[in-house]
């Protein structure tokens, strides 16, 4: 996982799930990654604290790499490299 926001890779797609709650963010992520290729990076923004548990599990289960996870004032940001 990347330690610093300064060294983040460019993203290929963005998904804003702000205002949505489990299971909606994961369902939208699953749909979004279907349109992407291995190696591409998806940026996800969320407001649901459950994503701190759900997104790492999503990545682990589907073979994606969670390369960045950050929380700032109730807003969660994730970068996921598709496997």
Image: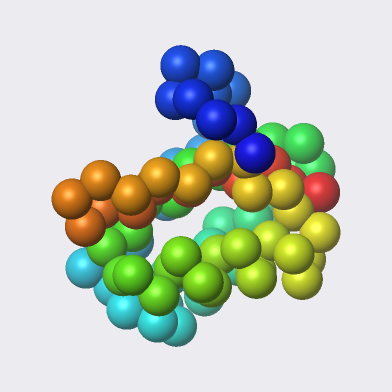
The answer to whether residue 5 is seen in the rendering is yes
In the image, farthest residue toward the bottom: 23
What scheme was used to colour the molecule?
A: rainbow
* Count of numbered tags: 0
Q: Quadrant of the N terminus?
A: top right
Viewer-proximal residue among 3 and 48? 3
Residue placed most toward the observer, 69 or 11: 69
Name the residue furthest front. Answer: 3
**Residue at 25% in and 46% down:** 72
Q: Is residue 16 visible?
A: no
Counting from the top left corner in percent of width and height, residue 75 is at 26, 53
Rendering coords of residue 74 (x, y %)? 21, 57
Q: Residue furthest left?
A: 73
The quarter of the displayed image where residue 9 is located: top right
**Residue 63 image offset from top left, x and y in percent:** 81, 59
Q: Residue at x 46, y 65 (%)?
A: 52
Seen in the picture, residue 23 relative to 52 is either above or below; the reply is below
Q: Residue at x 21, y 68 (%)?
A: 19
Residue 27, relative to residue 33: is it above or below?
Answer: below
Q: In which quarter of the view is residue 59 placed?
A: bottom right
Image quadrant assignment for residue 7: top right
Is residue 74 found left or right of 65 in the rendered image? left
In front of the other: 41 or 2: 2
* Residue 22: x %, y % from top left: 40, 82
Looking at the image, residue 59 sits to the left or right of residue 21; the answer is: right
Question: Which residue is depicted at the point 65% across and 69% down?
Answer: 58
Q: Is residue 67 left or right of residue 71?
A: right
């Amino acid at each position: 996982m990347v330690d610093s926001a300064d060294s983040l890779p460019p993203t290929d797609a963005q998904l804003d799930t702000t205002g949505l709650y489990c299971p909606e963010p994961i369902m939208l992520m699953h749909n979004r990654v279907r349109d992407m290729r291995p190696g591409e990076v998806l940026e996800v923004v969320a407001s649901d604290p459950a994503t701190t548990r759900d997104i790492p599990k999503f990545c682990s289960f589907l073979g994606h790499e969670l390369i960045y996870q950050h929380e700032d004032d109730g807003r969660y940001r994730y970068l996921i490299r598709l496997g």
